[in-house]
Amino acid sequence: MSTEEKDRIQLLEERLERLDEHDRMAAAEEIFAAVNELFGFDYHRIPVLLEYRADLSNCRILAAELEKLPALTGEHVRPLLLKMFGTNLDGIVAIEKAPISIRSKDNWVKRHEGDLVLIAGGYRDLDVVVSPTEAFVTVTGCERLPDELIRRLEQIGYVERDGHAYHEEPDGQPIPVEFKTETIMAITRYFEEFPFTDQ
């Protein structure tokens, strides 16, 4: 993990420390700007996962939720952003070394040249597909995930479709954070056990 990647959470913390605790709307706007700058998420466009009136902007919804927090610290704000938008900022920084690209809600969360697997979530986070990247296909000539990786993903709830792994929640709800974490861990463990080499 590069110093730059490690520092994104710290940089967010520093910006949170400068927020005006008494002006939650201004704080919400600064949080939107900081997360967009540091992580690439545009919270103006990402659907809110909480129940709120449709005429409220995402920024106003965040401002209302900030009112409920005891303090505007990362310890309180990051879990709120996860609950509201499904963005696990701590998790994103933690997986920087894994050979995984992640696309969620029409945003690249993580993408590096040479990543082998793509995890792509739908716009409202209702489904997720795991597929090989162009780098994987170019090197191996195979457009399918490795059979053993598919087997491991099936064990946690995916179904195989044309060499890719697909999952949606049976109740039509957004994919739980715990399931996303299981997915990342299954893929990371696979590549730790079977290091990729040009074949």
Image (tube, rainbow, N blue to C red):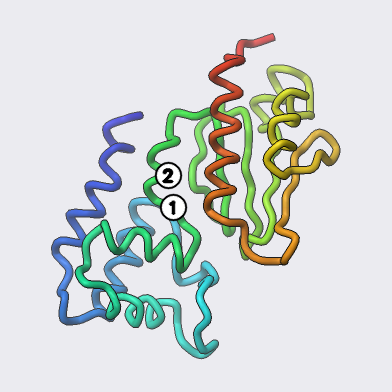
Residue 168, x across and y down, in percent: 72, 55
Residue 149, x across and y down, in percent: 70, 27
Say what secondary structure mark 1 lies in.
loop
How many numbered dots are placed on residues in this image?
2
Q: Is 73 left or right of 153, judged from the image as shown?
A: left
Residue occupying the point 35% across, 77% down: 65
Dot 2 alpha-carbon crowd within 10 angstroms: few under 14, some 14 to 19, many 20 or more = few
Residue 98, x across and y down, in percent: 49, 29
Dot 1 alpha-carbon crowd within 10 angstroms: few under 14, some 14 to 19, many 20 or more = some
**Quadrant holding the C terminus:** top right
Residue occupying the point 62% across, 42% down: 119
Tell me if label 1 and label 2 are in contact, CB under 8 Å: yes
**Quadrant holding the N terminus:** top left
Q: Is 147 left or right of 121, judged from the image as shown?
A: right
Q: Residue furthest right?
A: 162
Residue 121, x across and y down, in percent: 63, 53
Residue type of the residue flagged with mark 2: Gly
Residue occupying the point 51% across, 38% down: 111
> Which mark identifies residue 116?
none
Vertical side of 63 occupied by 101: above or below: above
> Which mark identifies residue 91?
2
Vertical side of 66 occupied by 1: above or below: above
Vertical side of 68 occupied by 118: above or below: above
Vertical side of 106 occupied by 93: above or below: above
Residue occupying the point 85% across, 37% down: 162
Residue that label 1 marks? 88
Residue 34, image quadrant: bottom left
Residue 147, image quadrant: top right
Frontmost residue, 96 versus 181: 181
